[in-house]
Amino acid sequence: MRLTLHTDYALRTLLYMGIHADRRVSIHEIASAYDISENHLVKVIHRLSRLGLIDARRGRGGELLLAHAPKDIRIGDVVRQTEDDMRLVHCEPGATENASCCILSDMCRLRGVLSVALGAFMQVLDGTTLADLLPPEEHGMLRERLPGPKLTVPPTGKVATQDRPTLQ
């Protein structure tokens, strides 16, 4: 099974937010960390927010925070809610408007085997939480790979981020 970019970005977003759960993060920050399109990420953030997985503040200073503890976010749920089509094959009669039906569809056993395989795949994801993917002993290494914005101290003495320096 190949997950869509939408699901991939949703999982990456949740991982980044889990690593930086001690503060709010921005869409720009996540997109920069993973070198992905901000425009595409906005759609992902919107969906995660609608699903109640993240708390998103709108506006120029809009920032994001996990809506639940990482231990309460099941990866299987995220995949089910972000994938539009979980079928592994499209061979059933009427599966798609433009696709022709496979001549074996009424007697094929492959579909059943693939269904069992998908069930096993989802069972593993259902048994995995965001916290499982972010063990505390690895937080330091993960933060090195996916650092937040670097803090700078302007002459005013107030701490600012590189992305949004304080105005003087």
Image: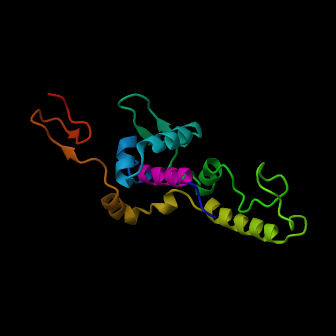
Q: What is the tally of numbered marks visible in this picture?
A: 0
Which region of the structure is painted magenta?
Answer: 5-17
Residue nearest the observer in this picture, 90 or 162 = 90
Residue 48, x across and y down, in percent: 54, 42
Residue 9 located within the stretch drawn in magenta: yes
Colour scheme of the rendered structure: rainbow
At 73% across and 62% down in the image, what residue appears?
Answer: 89
- Quarter of the figure that contains the N terminus: bottom right
Using the rendered image of the protein, determine whether residue 80 is visible from the camera's viewpoint.
yes
In the figure, is residue 166 to the left or right of 2?
left
At 25% across and 36% down in the image, what residue appears?
Answer: 164
Q: Residue furthest right?
A: 106
Q: How would you classify the magenta stretch by its main secondary structure?
A: helix
Residue 128, x across and y down, in percent: 58, 61
Residue nearest the observer in this picture, 155 or 164 = 164
Residue 64, x across and y down, in percent: 43, 39
Q: Is residue 37 above or below residue 3?
A: above
At 33% across and 58% down in the image, what residue appears?
Answer: 143
In the figure, is residue 53 to the left or right of 17?
right
In the figure, is residue 152 to the left or right of 91?
left
Using the rendered image of the protein, determine whether residue 24 is visible from the camera's viewpoint.
no
Residue 67 located within the stretch drawn in magenta: no
Residue nearest the observer in this picture, 37 or 46 = 37
Q: Is residue 63 above or below residue 12?
A: above
Residue 88, x across and y down, in percent: 71, 62
